[in-house]
Image (cartoon, grey):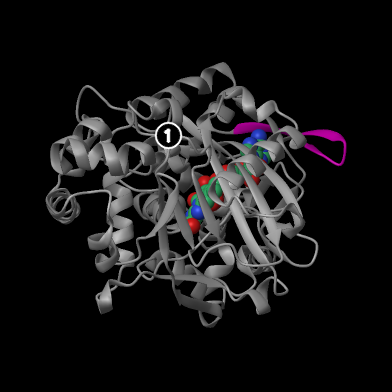
Amino acid sequence: MKTAVVGGGILGLTLSHRLNRLGHEVHLFEAAGHLGGLACPHDYGSFVWDRFYHCILPQDRHLRALLGELGLADELRWTVTQTGYWARGRRYDMSNNADFLRFPLLSVLSKARLGAAVIWATRFADPDALYTVSARDWLVRICGRKGYEVFWAPLLEAKFGTYHEQVAAVFIYATLTRLMEARSGVASKESFGYVSGGYGRILGRFEEALRQGGVAIHLGAPVQRIERMADGDACRVRFEEEGASIDETFDQVFFTAPNQLARRIVSDDLLPHVEEMERRNPASAVYLGTICCALVLRDALTPYYVLNIGDSTVGLTGLIEMTNLIDRDAETAGRSLVYLPLYLASDDPRFAEDDETLAAHFTAELGKLFPDFQPDQILHRVIHRERFVQPLPLVLDDKPSPAAPTKMARPFQIVNTSLLRCATLNNDEVVALVEKFVETNSEILRGGSQRRWRRVAAR
Ligand SMILES: Cc1cc2nc3c(=O)[nH]c(=O)nc-3n(C[C@H](O)[C@H](O)[C@H](O)COP(=O)(O)OP(=O)(O)OC[C@H]3O[C@@H](n4cnc5c(N)ncnc54)[C@H](O)[C@@H]3O)c2cc1C
């Protein structure tokens, strides 16, 4: 079976890996000159680390199993990290229950209600029902108005910008559930992990395994057109490689990047498939993007891995100090690595601003948090931009139909992160999504001969 996988992010790589094991002749197409998509590494001068911050959680069993398959299980490192919360001009520790109880901006009653609400929500709420209520209304209901206004509202504005009143409560539910699971039973401490060498190391192993398995990896090869052949049984894929435009026919094409990008390249008769995806999957129509300033600094800024920003006068979604999770001597040449992300609607005009303008913005915002910060602390600075990052569930009129296992369409199927249901965007969910998709369609995907493939697909 000759199969094309479009997109060499973690999803496309995992799918290629699984299809390769099932005996497909896989061609993986990646527009960039390297694999990894959002998880790819960047050269920061004195070291190489991820373009965007990534951590692994102890409960990430699908991702950890994959790392085991790639021979990287022993390379996982764990750190008990600290979390901070910035509000009203100063920072507060928020690493454990005792910190939360000391938080002075809420009354004892508001804190008790907020804490009880989080426990109740993560144990008993019906996540499907949370697609029909906004995060704001739900949080006001369960945490009280004061708890919402002081604690949640600035966080929602920082994360969702113009969408902060439209985002569905399920997003908050999924985030809280993931974070609560990360806090182990022992003293409720957050334990986060990483692979020594970062995602660059994981991607290197992945590429090696795929090439050894016989997967043809086309790098710097954007797919420009996907069209169904006249007999309806195959697709023609037009891609660019080394300056040439090439047409090749495949029995099956899987598209793993966001739907908005699929729309630009599929033929008219494949568009209904994209539209069907958007109808059935509540988070597929709107994506948040991110502009993220990464700074290599001489010294540490904070003791936290994440400093959440609960202050709408600060134009940052948060501050992530990677070197409070990873070993800075071993991984970043003794430097401190800090990310300043800003989440934005994917059509936000700031994506078009030049690096200097954006750098000035980030420096000014950092100055609000650390008035004594000296620019000569900065050894290296880079601005990363990505318009389509996070599929966003906006409030629906009705509960979505249950997340049916996706039955694959022939000869073109989208498998992307908008299929994630009641979940945050992370690589454990991405790997789990691929496993579930392959399992659901195992009969058709295992179909050895072309004849059997057609017979099974036709049922
Ligand atoms: C700021 C940030 C922080 C994150 N933190 C974490 C974290 O802590 N833990 C965690 O597990 N996850 C984290 N993630 C999420 C993680 O990065 C994603 O889950 C994962 O990268 C999604 O992979 P993907 O393959 O679905 O998409 P992508 O990585 O977007 O890959 C899609 C690929 O398709 C390619 N492509 C698009 N169009 C074409 C075309 N026409 N032809 C060929 N190729 C094409 C793109 O170039 C891209 O490489 C974070 C992400 C961001 C942005």
Q: Nearer the viewer, residue 177 or 365?
A: 365
- Residue at 71 percent across and 66 percent down: it is 298
| Farthest residue, direction right | 243
Which segment is the magenta one?
A: 235-246
Residue 133, above or below 18 = above
- Residue at 77 percent across and 36 percent down: it is 356
Tell me, yes or no, whether the highlighted magenta stretch contains residue 32: no
Which residue lies under the disc numbered 1?
Answer: 160
Q: How many labels were placed on the picture?
A: 1
Callout 1 amino acid: Phe
Residue 272, above or below 206 = above
Q: Nearer the viewer, residue 265 or 51?
A: 51
Q: Secondary structure at mark 1?
A: helix
Tell me, yes or no, whether the highlighted magenta stretch contains residue 240: yes
| Farthest residue, direction bottom | 74
Q: Which image quadrant for residue 446?
A: bottom left
Q: x, y percentage for residue 398? A: 20, 25
Q: Which image quadrant for residue 158?
A: top left
- Residue at 28 percent across and 49 percent down: it is 105
Q: Nearer the viewer, residue 284 or 54?
A: 54
Q: x, y percentage for residue 434? A: 44, 53
Q: Is the magenta region chiefly helix, strand or loop?
A: strand
| Farthest residue, direction top | 268
Which quadrant: the C terminus?
Answer: top left
Residue 359, above or below 21 = above
383 lies left or right of 52: right
Q: x, y percentage for residue 202? A: 61, 67
- Residue at 33 percent across and 72 percent down: it is 189
Q: Which image quadrant for residue 7?
A: top right
